Image (cartoon, helix red, strand yellow):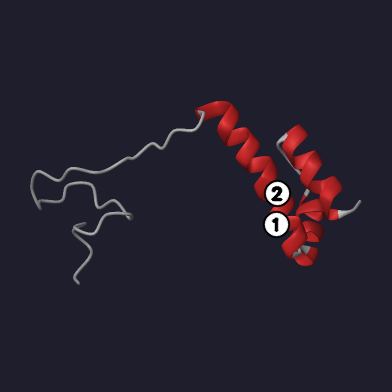
Amino acid sequence: MTDKELIDKLNRDKKLTLQEWSTLISTFTEEDREYAAQIARKISLAKNGNKIYLRGIIEFTNICHNDCLYCGIRCSNKN
């Protein structure tokens, strides 16, 4: 399969085999990236329209209870 065929399969079936992923990743070109980006943009416009959604975290204290890996104030972060 060509990379475009693999991208189309991924878009259609929402999955690839391990071998297909390996092939796609090892042979991916700028042209493939542009093709995949066009598909992703169409999906985004269909689901969200032409809107921008922002998400933020509001911190009320700097006391850590959960040690979440994404958080800058987690208790195990000594920096």
* Residue at image point 65% right, 49% down: 37
Q: Position of residue 55 (x, y in %)?
A: 32, 40
> What residue is disc 1 on?
33
Image position of 49 (left or right of 5): left
Q: Quote the CA–CA distance across marks 1 and 2.
A: 5 Å
Seen from this angle, which residue lies furthest front?
A: 50
Q: State the image coordinates of residue 71 (x, y, percent, origin top left).
A: 27, 54
> Hey, what amino acid is under mark 1?
Arg
The numbered mark at residue 66 is none
Residue 8, above or below 28:
above
Dot 2, how many residues are within 10 Å of its Cα: few (below 14), some (14-19), or many (20+)?
A: some
Question: To which quarter of the image does residue 53 belong?
Answer: top left
The amino acid type of the residue labelled 2 equals Ala
Disc 2: which residue: 36
- Residue 35, percent across and down? 74, 50
Nearer to me, 48 or 22: 48
Reply above or below: 5 against 28.
above
Q: Quadrant of the C terminus?
A: bottom left
Say which residue appears at 64% left-offset and 36% top-offset: 42
**Residue appearing at x 70%, y 57% in the figure:** 33
- The quarter of the picture where residue 46 lies is top right
Under tag 1, what secondary structure? helix
Q: Residue furthest bottom?
A: 79
Q: Which of the 4 image quarters holds residue 13?
A: top right
